[in-house]
Amino acid sequence: MVRSGIIGFGKMGQIRAKEISSNGKGAVVSVYEPNENIDSQEFHRAKSAEEIIHDPAIDAVIICTPNFLNKPLTIAALKAGKHVFCEKPPAFNAGEVEEIKEVAEFSDKKLMYGFNHRHHASIQRMKKLIDSQEYGNVLWMRGRYGKSVDKDFFKDWRVKQKSAGGGIFLDQGIHMLDLFLYIGGEFDEVKSFVSNLYWKLDIEDNVFAIFKNSKTGMAASLHSTMTQWRHLFSFEVFLEKGYMVLNGLKTSSGTYGDEVLSIAKNRSTAPAATWKDEERTTYHSDSFWKSEVEHFFTAIISDKPIEIGNINDALKLMQMVDKVYAEGRL
C-alpha cells in the first residue's frame, strides 16, 4: 500500500483522496488544509505541510495547493524522500522546473504532474491511432478551451499574478498545449497575442497562440479564454489520411457538455465530402482521475518510470509556456 499525505484539501485534494481510497493500492494517512471550514474528518488532519512531508508513515505526498506553492513543496518532499504527485502547473516558468529536475535527478522517488487531460479515454484512443500511423502524419491541430467567470472569481487566489503565476492560459490553456505536445510532438516556433481587455487584471483573460515545427511544417493554433461566456472544449487533429475531432469534455461539473470523439478517413474530393461515414463515440465516464492515480501508484509499486506527466514532459511544456508569454506579453 502506498501511504499518502495530501497537502491542500480543497476540491482537487478531495478528488484525489476519493480516488486513492478506492484504488486498492494506496491509503490516505493524513491531510493538511489551512481552511478550517473545509471538512476533513474522515482523515487525520495535520497541523502543517511540513508535518505531512516529514511524516515517516507517509510514502507519497500529493500536492493540491495554489500555484506558488507547487515548486517549494515538491522540492521539499523529494528531499524528504517522498514520492510526489503535484497538480499543474509545476512552477511559474521553465527555469523553476529545471530547479525541480535537478533535485529529482538525485532522488530515487517518483515525480508525476497532474496533466489529467492525457488520461481521458478519448485522448488515449487518439494517441494510439496516431502512433499507429494508420492515418499518416499530423498536418495541423486546432484547440479552443474557454469558460466564463463571474465576479466571485475576484475572491480567488487565481486572479493574482503573485500567487497564480499567470491567468487563464496557465490555469486552463496549459492543458490544451500539453495535448498538442502529447499528440503532435515538438514545436520550435511560437507567435502569440496575450490580452486582458475585459477583466482588467494583472493576469491575462485571453491568449491566441500559433505553434510550428519548422522541420515538418506541422502547425497548431490555440485559443485560451475566460471571456467565452459559455464553457467550451474543442480539440481537432487533421492528418494525411483523415481527422479526429474531440468536442466537449466529461467533467464532474458537466459544464463542457458531452465528450464526443469523431473520427473519419479521407472520403472524397471537396466540396462533395459527406459526413455519413464519420465514426462518433460519446464518452460517458470521467475515469481520468482514476487513471492518473493508477499510473502513479503502479509506477511506485512496480518501480517503473512515470510515462505520462513526468518531469521532462513538464519542462518541455513550461518552455513553450514561457515562449507564449514572452512573445505576447501584456
Image (tube, rainbow, N blue to C red):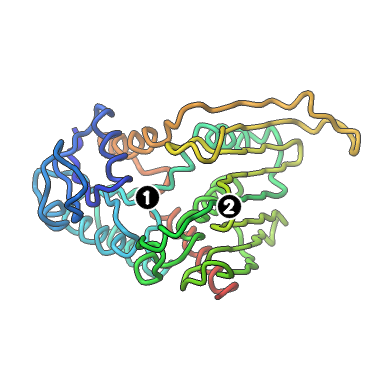
Between 193 and 100, the residue placed more toward the observer is 193
Report the residue at 31% width, 59% height from top: 70
Residue 326 image position (x, y, % from top left): 54, 74
Report the residue at 34% width, 33% height from top: 294
From this view, report whether residue 268 is shown above or below residue 96.
above
The amino acid at mark 2 is Trp
Between 70 and 149, the residue placed more toward the observer is 149
Report the residue at 62% width, 57% height from top: 223
The amino acid at mark 1 is Tyr
Q: Quadrant of residue 30?
A: top left
Q: Quadrant of residue 269?
A: top right
Dot 1: what SS?
A: strand
Residue 315 image position (x, y, % from top left): 44, 60
Q: In this rendering, would 326 be left or right of 11?
A: right
Residue 25 image position (x, y, % from top left): 24, 30
Q: How crowded is the residue under tag 1: few (<14 C-alpha within 10 Å), some, or many (20+)?
A: many
Q: Which residue is mark 2?
A: 229
Residue 237 image position (x, y, % from top left): 67, 43
Q: In this rendering, would 172 be left or right of 229?
A: left
Looking at the image, tell me whether mark 2 or mark 1 is earlier in sequence order.
Answer: 1
Q: Which residue is mark 1?
A: 113
